[in-house]
Amino acid sequence: MRSLFRRIGIQGLFLSAVLSLSAGCVRQQPSADAVPPPPAVSKQEARTTVVARVNGVELYQDAFIEVMGRVNAANERRSTPDPQDVTRRKALDLLVLEELAVQEAKRQGVSLGPSGLDNAMAKLQAKLGHEEGLKNYLAKENLSEAELRIRVERSLLIRLMYDREVVQKASVVPVEEVRKEYEQHKAQYRAPEKITLVDVVLFLKQDDSDSQKKAAEVLSRIQAEKEQDPRNLAADGTFAVRTLDSQKDEEPLLYDAARKLKPGEVSGVISTPDSLHIIKLLEYAPERPLTYEEASGDIERNLRAAAQQKRRQEWEQELKKDAKIELPDAPGQLKSGKP
């Protein structure tokens, strides 16, 4: 069933401060073609150890390690993380794609403008804690300020290129396509059932006679009040009041009790495995089809996401076309080929 809040996951091309990596932007390679783990070297050596060449430009292990960290972070958020050899392949492919994007930006004469980099550095410095924070960050990363400026410039150029080549070229979805998608899958666009209630959770033992007596007293206090609103109860430390949208698969006993009520009605004392409850149904709305007006915004976003994903894949191939890419065959060795 397609709900109003359904989303198509976008596989991002670049993972940096400005763009996110997809779980699948790199095809999985056979194990025989796996990228070997980088040799263990010092930070200084990592800055001189070449892991790939792109059109003659050498890419170093420190950059690969930084990208690996970002890819690993994304990998850990997945329900089925990739093996490390696949993750390394993705990181290397990402590193190559970032370099190709920067080279293409320079070829097209794309720049940040006279003050773009200075403004970005000022924002970063403020985020790090101004001069002292910047100093600590540079020491931790073993960078000079000039080297940090290069990193920031690269990230911003990547963002500019991604915006120009992907976002802007796949940002408009014709109304006719939105309407066509809605008409073809109209039955699948539905607003889910909604049950909103006030729940009085009593911190009492379910099977104790005194607890049942106390719960009945609380219920009487609710029923005696003109509005019969549990939210008006004076707290005495034996209960808590919450407003929630009830879900059948989360709290089935409360859901079933709420379905027997009319809006505005108060239940009796409900015993669940963890506590005693008294509920009042505030609103009930059954599941229903979404109108075109209700669904069109979500449909347009999904179609735009799909179009940008397709355009991103096209751009990746455009970047790689005719590029000379040398990849590692074994630690410390390179081979010619394409990722």
Image: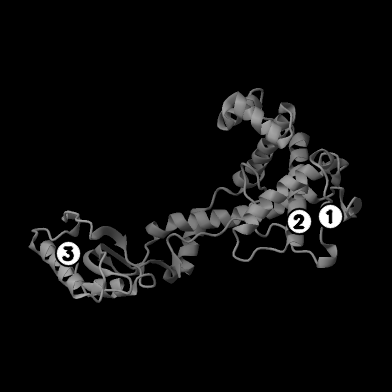
The location of residue 313, given as percent across then percent down, is 69, 55
Location of mark 2 (residue): 88
Q: Residue at x 16, y 59 (%)?
A: 229
Q: Residue at x 77, y 52 (%)?
A: 92
Marker disc for residue 338: 1
Q: CA distance from mark 1 to mark 3?
A: 66 Å
The location of residue 279, given as percent across then percent down, is 22, 66
Decide which of 205, 15 is in the foreground and name it.
205
- Disc 3 secondary structure class: loop
- Disc 2 secondary structure class: helix
Decide which of 98, 92 is in the foreground and name it.
92
Disc 2 packing (10 Å; few <14; some 14–19; many ≥20): many
Q: How is the image coloured?
A: one colour
Decide which of 271, 178 is in the foreground and name it.
271
Which picture quadrant has residue 145? top right
Location of mark 3 (residue): 264
In the image, residue 257 above or below residue 10 = below
